[in-house]
Amino acid sequence: MAGALVGIALFILIVTALGLFQVLRADLAIERMMAVQLLGTGGAAVVLLFGAASGAGSMADVALLMMLFAAFSCTAFTLGEASAPEADDREEDT
């Protein structure tokens, strides 16, 4: 059973790396933000699968922190993008 979990974790890791490479090549900042979300969810899945394969119970805490950091970075990006056009408008008016 542990071998199957490790195999699934490696598959998710490879798919996440390929998706991350594809998204990071993009020019738009929103697509880079999606790369952070992809890394957070894929990384959490890999950590949980490796934790289940090894029997370590504390891996759930690490996976939860990875998901939280990904969500916080998404929120910070969204708030930064929402306030950016207003700053550009003020500079053009003066």
Image: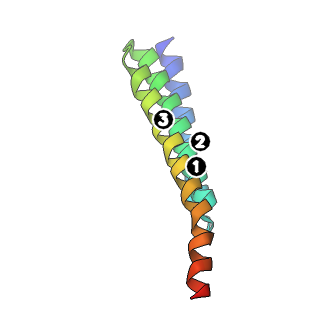
Please give the name of the residue rendered at 44% of the width and 23% of the height, measured from the top-left corner: 50
Q: Which mark is residue 46?
A: none
Q: Amino acid at mark 3?
A: Leu
Q: Amino acid at mark 2?
A: Val
The image position of residue 74, as x and y in percent, is 55, 48
Location of mark 1 (residue): 18
Q: Amino acid at mark 1?
A: Leu
In the foreground, 41 or 18:
41
Quarter of the C terminus within the rendering:
bottom right
**Side of 93 where 55 appears, left or right:** left
Q: Which mark is residue 15?
A: 2
| Quadrant housing residue 92 | bottom right
From what the image shows, is residue 42 above or below residue 63? below
| N-term mark: 1 or 3 | 1
Element assignment for label 3: helix
Tell me if I can see residue 17 in this picture.
Answer: no
